[in-house]
Image (spheres, grey):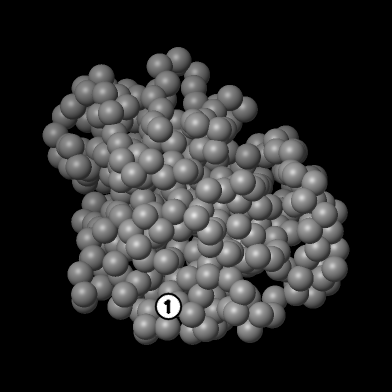
Amino acid sequence: MSKISVAVLGATGPIGQRFVQMLESHPYFEIEGLYASERSEGKRFGDAVKIRDHKFSDEALETKIRSMDLDHISKNARIAFSGIPSDLAGPTESELAKKGVAVFSNAGSHRMDKHVPILIPEINPDHAVSVKRQDTYGNGGYIVTNANCSSTGIAPPLFALDKKFGLEEVFISTYQALSGAGYPGVASLDAVGNVVPFIDKEEEKMEKELGKILGGYSDEGFKPASFRVLANCARVPVIDGHLESLVIKLSSSPSPEDIASTLSKFRGEPQTLKLPSAPEVPIIVRTERDRPQPVYDALAGSPERARGMATTVGRIRDGNGYCKMFVLSHNTLRGGAGGSMLNAELFKAKGLL
């Protein structure tokens, strides 16, 4: 079976590098080209690599970066995996969709567009049909976004709990890794030994996007979920892995044991379809009193292709009528390139490519 040709946009950045990692020996997709800004044209991909926890193939390391010629991409690639900054992503992704390319984006530019899904396949695979209402779908082009990296990890446990017990309110405090700010990200003198209690537009995105992800979809558009979300976001001196504190008001009063059992048993469509990048267990519950921790749990998930694709939950407990817990996910894998990769795998399984 021939593989589907894909382009990686923003290949020199942290998310672009993770796309290349996940595309190596992928059973569905093969890289047509790696693209970045004109200043990177002609450079080896290996010269841009900053990832420390993956050894790239010699073929990937020697691949030359190309500037983003959208006509060339549209003629040679069926899919564009987009890891470019939001200000550039908006018009670039729209133009590629007009040219018939299926764009799977990590950027936030189109997340709140009327018929563009914020897709997390374990949660809202039914939202995939929304692309058929995009003006460019007749050409074969459309845009699919993955969630903000801080929303991605907490969305699966929130969905599982809402489905079983009903959500009323969610209070979130995030402790977000430096890699979420891109490269070079936060200056070392600002980050080392410090916590920065502000990430531009992050809280607003979480409070708005979670409602769309966990809500419904019809031909008229998306209907947000009814529960209330309040977020506080901070940057901490961790390389990879967003740790988040959740305080949740549920419609019923399950015990911590009931909550842990519900989360541990949760499975979604990617697990049923056995998608290549889907973790066998999407929510891993830890019982130790001091887990999850980024250094131990950021790369949770199996099989090997799904390392970093699972969400880890721990310290589940009661508190004055609320449920409290900590959640950890890998921000550039599950919350970045891996999220888009799983979305594309779902689209292939659904015959939408």
Q: Is residue 106 above or below residue 94?
A: above
Taking the view exactly as shown, the residue that stands out farthest to the left is: 252
Task: For residue 78, say whether it is visible.
Answer: yes
Q: Position of residue 148 (x, y in %)?
A: 48, 55
Measuring 49% from the left and 84% from the top, which residue is drawn there? Answer: 98
Provide the secondary structure element on which disc 1 rests.
loop
Which of 145/63 is in front? 63
In the picture, measured across the screen, residue 180 lies left or right of residue 278, that is right
Query: Measuring 40% from the left and 33% from the top, which residue is drawn there?
Result: 280
Residue closer to the observer: 226 or 12: 12
- Residue 212 x, y percent position in the rendering: 32, 61
The residue at the far front in this view is: 1
* Residue tagged 1: 140
Along the viewing direction, whichever of 42 and 339 lies nearer the viewer? 42
Residue pictured at 50% horizontal, 31% vertical: 303
Q: Label 1 neighbourhood size at 10 Å, few (<14), some (14-19), many (20+)?
A: some
Identify the image quadrant of residue 192. Answer: top right
Q: Quadrant of the C terminus?
A: bottom left
* Vertical comparison of 158 with 86: above or below: above
Q: Position of residue 341 (x, y in %)?
A: 50, 53
Type of the residue with mark 1: Gly
Q: Which residue is painted at 35% across and 39% down in the image?
A: 271
Taking the image as drawn, is residue 48 in sight? no
